[in-house]
């Protein structure tokens, strides 16, 4: 239904060693959310991108394709007349016109599209940070004329070792320390919907990211939303010298194009008298 394809492009070739999906070692787009994620035509939706690993000021460029293909194949527009430049705003508004003329042209070209059930249009964001690296992501935005359109889920909190971890507070961990993370989503925002004649409820899917250290799993969901993050050991450090701060990001998706996210700061030190203590 909705997909995000993240791609890293360096100025000089690419490496054969792919990093762990949870690692944020350089500029990345971790998620793109649309509000609303599903809408009728004509209408508007606001976009925002979760960018991490930047080394300078982030510059955005957004494009919309009203007749896109498979997002796993990149940003492919079937008709250049359906391509719209959305500019360089941090959170642009996507204008969706009346699609009837475009759908008629598509059908004349041999494509069968059912707007009543819904179609996906593609949005691409490209970000740079002043280095020789750029990051791109493709988001599918659902356009339908259904009465029960999807809305975004919502993260309501994150616990660390059984204690609430407010978004505006960091924590301190020692080298090699393990912490247990438990996300919370607003159950009322996980909608019920018709899936081929069967009423089902959305399931929260969590994706985890951090600048260093390691997660027990890259994604968690369902009855087991918790995860474990392990701080790096001294042998795993590159050029970092404790104490240092890192970022941790959590993205919530509902598998139907809706998403939300949150982020936290962690201070890594040599030793710690009390595990999980608030950062100074």
Image: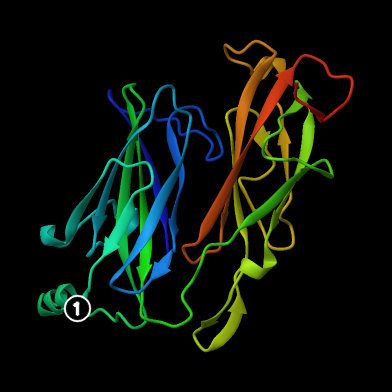
Q: Is residue 232 visible?
A: no
**Secondary structure found at label 1:** helix
User: Residue 72, position in %: x, y?
Assistant: 34, 54
Is residue 82 left or right of 94 when viewed as pictured? left
Residue 10 against residue 44 in the figure, above or below? above
Is residue 270 left or right of 145 when viewed as pictured? right
Q: As drawn, which residue projects farthest toward the right?
A: 273
At horizontal 39% and vertical 26% (from top left) the residue drawn is 57
Residue 53 against residue 22 in the figure, above or below? above
Q: Nearer the viewer, residue 214 or 38?
A: 38
Dividing the image into 4 quarters, which one contains the C terminus?
top right
Quadrant of residue 147 within the rendered picture: bottom left
Is residue 142 left or right of 265 when viewed as pictured? left
How many residues crowd around disc 1 within 10 Å: few (fewer than 14), some, or many (20 or more)? few
Quadrant of residue 230 within the rendered picture: top right
> Which residue is labeled 1 in the image?
100
Dividing the image into 4 quarters, which one contains the N terminus?
bottom left
Residue 40 against residue 167 in the figure, above or below? below
Q: Is residue 207 visible?
A: yes
User: Residue 51, position in %: x, y?
Assistant: 45, 37
At horizontal 31% and vertical 22% (from top left) the residue drawn is 132
Count the labels in the image.
Answer: 1
At horizontal 41% and vertical 22% (from top left) the residue drawn is 56
User: Residue 130, position in %: x, y?
Assistant: 33, 22
Quadrant of residue 79 within the rendered picture: bottom left
User: Residue 242, position in %: x, y?
Assistant: 69, 12
């Amino acid at each position: 239904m909705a997909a995000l394809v993240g791609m890293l492009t360096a100025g000089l070739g690419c490496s054969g060693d792919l990093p762990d999906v949870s690692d944020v070692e350089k500029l990345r787009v971790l998620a793109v959310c649309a509000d609303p994620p599903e809408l009728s035509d004509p209408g508007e939706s606001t976009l925002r991108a979760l960018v991490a690993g930047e080394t300078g000021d982030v510059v955005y460029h957004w494009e919309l394709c009203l007749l896109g293909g498979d997002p796993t194949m990149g940003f492919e527009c079937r008709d250049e007349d359906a391509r719209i430049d959305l500019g360089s705003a941090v959170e642009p508004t996507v204008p969706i016109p009346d699609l009837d003329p475009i759908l008629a042209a598509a059908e004349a070209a041999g494509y069968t599209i059912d707007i009543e059930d819904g179609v996906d249009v593609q949005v691409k964001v490209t970000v740079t940070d002043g280095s020789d690296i750029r990051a791109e992501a493709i988001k599918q935005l659902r356009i339908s004329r259904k009465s029960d359109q999807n809305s975004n889920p919502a993260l309501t909190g994150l616990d660390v070792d059984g204690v609430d971890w407010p978004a505006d507070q960091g924590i301190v961990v020692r080298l090699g320390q393990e912490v247990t993370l438990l996300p919370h989503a607003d159950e009322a925002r996980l909608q019920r919907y018709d899936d081929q004649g069967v009423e089902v409820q959305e399931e929260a899917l969590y994706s985890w990211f951090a600048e260093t250290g390691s997660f027990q799993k890259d994604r968690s969901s369902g009855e087991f939303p918790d995860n474990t993050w392990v701080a790096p050991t001294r042998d795993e450090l590159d050029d970092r010298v404790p104490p240092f701060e890192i970022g941790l990001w959590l993205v919530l998706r509902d598998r139907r194009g809706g998403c939300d996210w949150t982020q936290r700061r962690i201070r890594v030190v040599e030793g710690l008298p009390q595990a999980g203590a608030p950062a100074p």
